[in-house]
Image: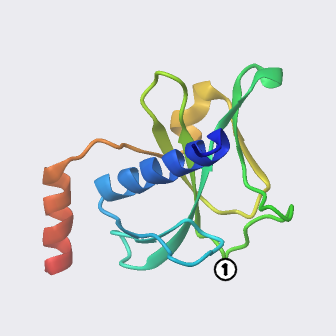
Amino acid sequence: MAHITETVAMYSELIAQTALLANGWTTHVPRTKEAYDILATNPATGRAEKVQVKTIRRRTDRNGDLVIYTRKGNGTTYDLAEADWIAGVLAEDGAPPRVFLLENTCQSEYWCVESRLAERWPELPISLDRRMLALLEAETAA
């Protein structure tokens, strides 16, 4: 059986990929070890962009504030050549997962008070909206 941190990381990557797909992005997962987890085509720009996925943690010593730790194994942050976006996945026991897509500003941590999530971190719904996808498809075909 995989180690729990490995299982949670893979779960977060799959949920982030699901959210991107549900919002019109085309996703690709690298076969070789890369700094990013997902290469995705942005439906708004048509550009391929690199997405680094991280599981959001709740800081019990800070009143439950949410934090996305974005340091690599060597302690450095992701630069813009390595990741355009940080996808934070909030995966708590028994609750539906939530995905937030933040522009990479090369920080080592992204913090947010839960009461300000809606205004600070853009959320990508994981529910499928076929009408929205059809509209996106029609726009790109035109």
Along the viewing direction, whichever of 33 and 28 lies nearer the viewer: 33
Badge 1 element: loop
Name the spot of residue 54 as percent of width and height, x first.
Answer: 62, 50
| Left or right side of 85 for 40 | left
Q: Residue furthest front?
A: 1
At 79% across and 64% down in the image, what residue appears? 77
**What's the image's color scheme?**
rainbow
Q: Callout 1: 10 Å neighbours few (<14), some, many (20+)?
A: few
Along the viewing direction, whichever of 28 and 127 lies nearer the viewer: 28
In this figure, what is the number of numbered marks? 1
At label 1, the amino acid type is: Ala
Name the spot of residue 118 as percent of width and height, x first.
Answer: 51, 35
Looking at the rendering, in which quadrant would you find the C terminus? bottom left
Looking at the picture, does residue 9 appear above or below residue 43?
above
| Left or right side of 15 for 134 | left
At 50% across and 53% down in the image, what residue appears? 13
Looking at the picture, does residue 26 appear above or below residue 90?
below
At 57% across and 43% down in the image, what residue appears? 1
Name the spot of residue 95 as percent of width and height, x first.
Answer: 46, 24
Name the spot of residue 5 as percent of width and height, x first.
Answer: 66, 43
Among the 4 quarters of the image, the one containing residue 134? bottom left
Q: Residue furthest right?
A: 75
Looking at the picture, does residue 117 appear above or below residue 70?
above
Q: Which residue is mark 1?
A: 81
At 42% across and 79% down in the image, what residue appears? 47
